[in-house]
Amino acid sequence: MIKKFIFLLLLVFVTQPNALVFDIENEKTLNNTINHQIKDTFVFSGLAVYLNQLSYYVVDNTVKQIDPTNTEVITLNQNQWLAIVGRFNVLAIQANQASVSFVGEKLTLKLNGARPITHLLQKNQLDTINPELDQIRYQHLWYPFAQLAKLSETTMVFIKQALSTNWGVAILLFAVVVKLLLLPISILTVKYQRKVSEVSTKLEPILKKIKATHDGEEAHIRLMQAHKHLGVSPFYTLKPLMSTLIQIPVLIAVFNALGEMPQFNGVPFLWFNDLAYPDNLVNLPFTIPLLGDSLNLMPFLMLIVTVISTILFTNSKATNLEVTKQKRNLYLMGVVFFVLFYPFPSAMVMYWMFATLLQIIQQRFIRI
């Protein structure tokens, strides 16, 4: 009965940024709190397992990550916080001269007479305790990516509050905003791709003839002359790739925000019970490597949308053979993304599916 009362008490403090009082020097109590209140107890599969990870930091005006496999003892000063960070929640402890160490990756804390200040709260509440603690949000990302992730989260919060809508609709509207912001780059990428296809169509038969009739240095010289005659370098195919790479930081930031925003936790949408987790329709009696042990509908819808997008794909500057190759690559990418995204939270899969739908619209109405 006492254990249940303590457990319910802890639950209250998960959503309230108030001081939390419990015996943090008791290793069992401390680590049980971490494993049940900080670490996400849902077991993810595949690449989504990173959502189950815990991170440990010492925070003041800087952030220093602690390796739990290191047996070194760390002593906190009066300005430092020990932050134990999970997917949504953070346990923040401040205790001057307290000793922090790990035994078998289990945290041990010795107060050494200090009076601790302890908070168990959501990541989006960190700045209400101390602005310095807010540094640990998206700390695992490179700084520019972390700032983009924060901006993505702020934008989704703004959309929801400004339109008084639910989180599911806010995610879809955010996908529209991102698509519009990236539209110039997307148009430039398509323009480069069309140019590459046009050049390749003219260049391919010339290159085949040179390779068939010449070899060695002579073949190399003639190949270079063929490229120069068409006004391109041998690396002309990299232009579309470079413009595509510009979009990758945005995608990384968006997906980290979608995966770690505590605001999605427990929020239903459409048939989803919880946007923060896969839209589990049925539990399977077995586990599929990389995919997990549940039947999720959203990844299949994402795959269908990707297939439709590929069927509708056209390239007037390429030969039929080249278009066939491009479509084959798109089908393969669709299958790869299906496997990668399958175990991820429904919010992330839904965003990607809707972004693909917007890509179909772009293909149909923006001709280059």
Image (cartoon, helix red, strand yellow):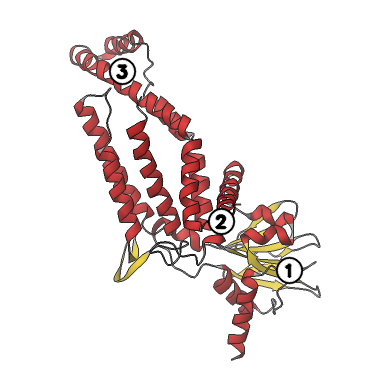
Q: Quadrant of residue 282?
A: bottom left
Gap between marks 1 and 3 measured at Cα: 66 Å
**Viewer-nearest residue: 93 or 179:** 179
Q: Residue furthest front?
A: 163
Q: Amino acid at mark 2?
A: Ser
Secondary structure, mark 3, is: helix
Gap between marks 1 and 2 measured at Cα: 46 Å
Q: Residue furthest bottom?
A: 1
Residue 270 seen from this side: yes
Q: Earlier in the sequence, mark 1 or mark 3?
A: 1
Q: Earlier in the sequence, mark 1 or mark 2?
A: 1
Q: Amino acid at mark 1?
A: Ser
**Viewer-nearest residue: 155 or 211:** 155
Q: Quadrant of residue 100?
A: bottom right
Q: What residue did someone put label 2 on?
A: 164
Q: What residue did someone put label 3 on?
A: 199
Q: Is residue 93 above or below residue 353?
A: below
Q: Position of residue 132 (x, y in %)?
A: 73, 54
Residue drawn at the location 60% of the way across and 76% of the way down: 11
Q: Residues within 10 Å of mark 3 (few under 14, many from 20)?
A: some
**Viewer-nearest residue: 79 or 159:** 159
Query: Which mark is drawn over residue 99?
Result: 1
Q: Amino acid at mark 3?
A: Val
Residue drawn at the location 43% of the way across and 64% of the way down: 44
Q: Earlier in the sequence, mark 2 or mark 3?
A: 2
